[in-house]
Image (cartoon, grey):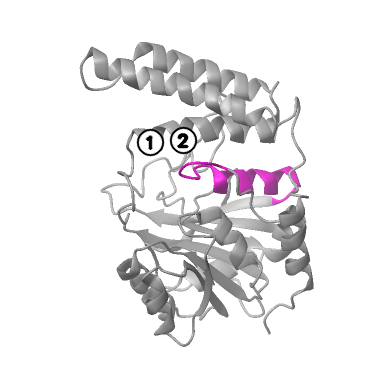
Amino acid sequence: MAPRSGVAVEGLTVTVGIVTWRRPEFLRETLEHLSRQRVPVEQVLVVVAADDPGAAVVDSLGWVTKLESTEVGGHRTRARNEALLHASSEIIAFLDDDAYPRADWSANLKAAFADPTVAAVAGRTCDGLPGEEHRGVDAVGQLRSDGELTGNFAADTRRVIDVEHGIGANMAFRRSVLADLGGMRDDFPGTALREETDLFLRVRATGGRVVFAPDVIVDHVGAPHMSGRRFDWRYMFWARHNHVLLLARNYGLASPLLRRWLVLNVREIVRLPGPGGPLRRLIRGGLGFGALLAGLATSLPKARVGPRDPRRVDSVGKHITAALTSTSTAP
């Protein structure tokens, strides 16, 4: 189908960056879907570790650029920053290697960015769950007053709406915005949860407009993780830990937002909800408190009393800014 906006998409160029980690069959399917776009993208970059079987998939396709590095294996954010150093287009999009873009994905993405006020786009990410298109249509991509995030990125809002954050499996940014920010912060540890949320919040902190475009659709098939289950205790530990870091750095250690979220989580942990016997619940509670305390410890040297400058000005950030500023965009 044609983009609902009806806006012409000529003149905008798109680079797609894909990070892969030992899931070659999913990577191949994602690239196959990209090859069938009604409006082709101008550049596709795949960041892969040297010993990853996904490298052979990329080598078999002449239209995909392989970025091979010994430093990115299993480190999604660092790999995405590597893609920024080689991107040549005005719009830089990221897809997970298990997120299959529908045929009008690129056309609708370009249509969304045809509005010059848009700095970043969060696309619709469908998980194939019954009724997901109707769930949370009024609460997509919000940061609530208690510090909690809403997702609902599979919802069909039927129109482009303003949001506060998006999903890393299907997101895109103006090149100039990423140059100003110095790329992504790559120090969210563990499973790197909240790294994409951090980027969207930083876009908004510099005055950029973030929108959810429900026609920029991928089908997210949820490939298995290389280590651990998708929502195991390791995942939950880093979810809390990194959320503390997210709020502390973007809003400050003295932020009411951080305080409310900590109180909310302490209450949840004390109630010890969930399945299992007393010992299992006690262990879960200990991990919860440990995550909060570890998150605060990690935040102390990285945060301020008030919000921190959203721009990354360390050597890596300056390198990314220089690359995005000096490299000509694709014709």
Q: Residue at x 29, y 47 (%)?
A: 131
Dot 2 falls on a residue whose secondary structure is helix
In the figure, 307 relative to 62: above or below?
above
- Most foreground residue, 168 or 3: 168
Q: What stretch is highlighted in magenta?
A: 188-208
Q: Pinpoint residue 178: horizontal percent, then vertical percent.
A: 70, 58
Q: Name the residue under label 2.
A: 238
Dot 1 falls on a residue whose secondary structure is helix
Give the image quarter of residue 1.
Answer: bottom left
Q: What residue type is labelled 1?
A: Arg
Give yes or no for contact between labels 2 and 1 (Cβ–Cβ under 8 Å).
yes
Q: Residue at x 56, y 46 (%)?
A: 195
Give the crowd class for mark 2: few <14, some 14-19, many >=20 residues within 10 Å: many
Give the crowd class for mark 1: few <14, some 14-19, many >=20 residues within 10 Å: some
Q: Residue furthest left?
A: 277
Is residue 160 shown to the viewer in this render? no
In the figure, 29 relative to 290: above or below?
below
In the image, which disc is placed on residue 234? 1
Give the image quarter of residue 103.
Answer: bottom left
Q: Residue at x 60, y 49 (%)?
A: 186
Q: Is residue 263 left or right of 37 when viewed as pictured?
A: right
Q: Which residue lies furthest to the bottom in this view?
A: 62
- Most foreground residue, 294 or 304: 294
Asked whether residue 71 is drawn in magenta, I would say no
Q: In which quarter of the image is the C terminus?
A: bottom right
Q: Is residue 18 left or right of 223 when viewed as pictured?
A: right
Asked whether residue 200 is drawn in magenta, I would say yes
Q: Pinpoint residue 204: horizontal percent, then vertical percent.
A: 69, 45
Q: What residue type is labelled 2?
A: Trp
